[in-house]
Image (tube, rainbow, N blue to C red):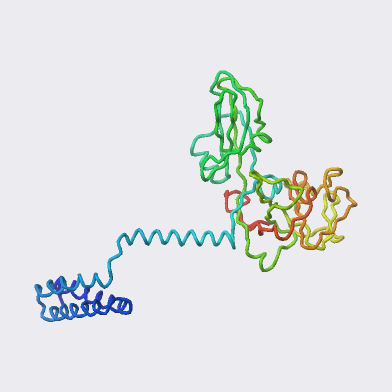
Amino acid sequence: MFMPKYMEDGRALVKEARKVINYRKDVARPEDVERVRQNLEGLKEALKRRSSEGVQKAENELLPSLGKLQPRRELSGIRENVELIVVAIVLALGIRAYYLQPFKIPTGSMQPTLNGVIGHRTTTPQPDFFVRAFQFLTLGRTYADVTCEGATDSIVSISAAKLNPFWDGSVIRMSSGKIYKVGIDPRSLEDQMRVGPGQSFKKGEPIVRGYADLGDQLFVDKFSYNIFGPHRAEVFVFRTNGILGIPPGPNMESEHYIKRLAGLPGDTLRIQQPLLFVNGHEAQEYGFRRVESQQNGYTGYRNVPNDTMYLGDPNATLTIPKGNYFALGDNSANSYDSRYWGFVPWQNVVGRGMFVYWPFSSHWGFVR
């Protein structure tokens, strides 16, 4: 049966008014609620009479009293969006504080299990934009191509810098006063790409030409250790504050290291290159066996006589004291780990390296 538009609108307003009364009757002033009820009865009577003018008049009387009972929220859409963003931020901070924390592999001490920043010098110009974008997504690769702009110039210093809120890199200061910004960290520039202070360049010569793979980025599980505690052979992250053999980072702050947990409290360790022995037996866990294999880039566990504090001799043993852990890098030939500086106190442990979320390379997935 056809219903005029004014009847549809009137009935919809009746439903809305009933909802407002039920919702606000316990908090609104009684006289405001009563006024809405009276106006609502007037609208219902006009609808029964099917009078277009009567319905319009009753609506005009009801709407102001209804608005007074439940004032319209100004900018409600913006307010709701802001509330949603605030809730999302609070949830993200809570997850980061208690459950998962993103972590970037800074060095090569865990290679080839996990890649740190690796710089490569090249002699050819960087590829086009689309190739660079694809390689950044899949490999975490960033290119740098900086040429000398003056007649002759030389590098005075290379220092770490935050190029933007999301990107760390380097600032290269030249003797001419010229400054070049590069999206590659100083260690990779100097140690791997052989770019350093004192080098001189003529106009048009490349100061930095190459690329850096920015290292694996993973989520650290901070929750499970609160229930189950660390397990031998897991990849774990810890803070360096209070570990005497590790100098503080920039601004004298604690840093985060990532290694493989080689020894639990009470374990007795020995390294007889390339093998690791735990409590008198060759380590059997997958992570250890992979390092010991000396295949696919793994070098085996190394004794470093006269250089390390512990396990430098194949016959030397070490028992881990209570409340401490022993950390070894998978790249044993080039890892500054517990052999050099000692033990990781339990209170320094952050969590278990769980999942590589970027880049989308062969390391993407759960950490083993």
Q: What percent of the width, then of the height, locates residue 174?
A: 59, 26
Between 275 and 65, the one lying in front of the other is 65
In this picture, residue 139 sits left or right of residue 238: left
At x 66% / y 51%, what residue is drawn?
Answer: 256
Q: What percent of the width, then of the height, locates residue 68?
A: 24, 70
Q: What percent of the width, then of the height, locates residue 105?
A: 64, 48
Between 357 and 319, the one lying in front of the other is 319
Between 201 and 30, the one lying in front of the other is 30
At x 11% / y 78%, what residue is drawn?
Answer: 50
Does residue 352 lie above or below 105 as drawn?
below
In this picture, residue 176 sits left or right of residue 51: right
At x 53% / y 34%, what residue is drawn?
Answer: 127
Name the residue furthest top. Answer: 151
Q: Quadrant of the C terminus?
A: bottom right
Q: What percent of the width, then of the height, locates residue 106?
A: 65, 46
Q: Quadrant of the N terminus?
A: bottom left
At x 58% / y 34%, what residue is drawn?
Answer: 171
Does residue 256 lie above or below 28 as drawn?
above
